[in-house]
Image: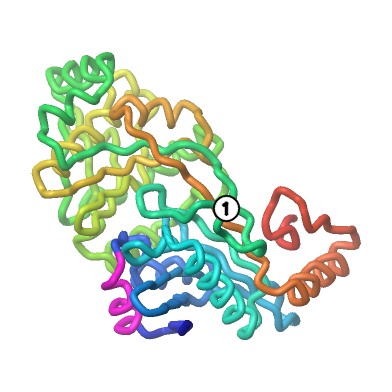
Amino acid sequence: MQTLIIRGDEATWTKALSVFDHDTYHSYAYSRLEATRYRAEPLGILTSQEDRAFFLPLLQRRIAPELDVTDATSPYGYPGPLYSPGAAEDNHFVRDSLEHAANALAEIGVCSAFVRGHPLLPCPNSKALPSLVQYTEHGETVWIDTSQTERLSWRGVRSSDKNRINKALRNGVSAEIDDEWAALPDFLRIYATTMDRVNANDEYYFGADYFQGLRVALGRAAMLCVVRYEGEVVAAGIFLRHESVLQFHLSGSRTELKHLSPARVMVDHMRRWATANGVRSFHLGGGLGARKDSLFEFKAGFSPLRATFWTWRLITSGKLFQRAVAHAEARSGRAIDPQAPFFPPYRFN
């Protein structure tokens, strides 16, 4: 089995992805953008054996300036892991590839990795995972089969939501894709207000530089959909498209105009766009923190189809992991439980 760690080489990263069914979240451009936000370094791990291959994008982070141990985390969203056709069903390859990847990470000083799964791509059976991996299911996500006709896709929308969408359209609410991102300032204000309203965690707050960087890094793969009423922007969202998959990335809507259902009009507009533009799957995601909250219920109105959001927690080197824990204990003056729910536990404040 061969293992390759890819750093700072977009051409090699992109070539590695070519054998996998993947998403925008796996691209080098997206990982590089996320690395800037995390003050990290993007790295890709590719393991292969004969006709089987495994790829995982990660962000390598320093734990403390004075510590020569690092860790890794997935970029925000649904960035992996990836398996070539048939590889996820090969239990021996799944186990061996992860063990080789973990060893390669340990050799460069990475003690642990937190991995966010992709609900729509092949995932190995949790029983096939080696002992160094802890698999956790967090909740359901919603997706729409946009490979079918518009009529069949519309049939999957909840009746009450159909009524709200039709009423909003009759009342003059309209949606469009803003190719020039001219309404980005409006989106920024609405998005920040929305995050405040739902008491979102810090990880859901993104500054103007992030969104500008997203547009530059991803080009036409990142789309801004804008909803207007009486000439004003009342909702907006950013959607990421890679070939056959469309992702509902981030959005916001004006609270005082909630009765106009602008967010529903936006998602329905993108559902129709996806159907018309050859997208097979429109992934809406789940609730905040994968909970079945009001956000999940909103998304659930567009489709009966569900997928599972899961994560992996890897301790790549017990020795390095214990050094990170000991360092955190010395700095905080308190004991750290290695089995704490937060992972990695030495980053818990």
Nearer-the-camera pick, 200 or 53: 53
Q: Return the x and y of residue 310 as percentages of the image width and height.
A: 51, 48
Point 49% across, 62% down: residue: 91
Nearer-the-camera pick, 5 or 20: 20
Point 84% across, 68% down: residue: 331
Q: Which residue is mark 1?
A: 127
Q: Quadrant of the C terminus?
A: bottom right
Instruction: Please report the bounds of the magenta region as a residue range.
Output: 10-20
State the image quarter where residue 21 is shown: bottom left
Point 51% across, 72% down: residue: 97
Nearer-the-camera pick, 39 or 188: 39
Q: Return the x and y of residue 74 as percentages of the image width and height.
A: 50, 63
In the displayed structure image, the side of residue 162 where residue 80 appears, left or right? right
Point 41% across, 78% down: residue: 48
In the displayed structure image, the side of residue 291 where residue 273 appears, left or right? left
In the displayed structure image, the side of residue 192 where residue 158 appears, left or right? left
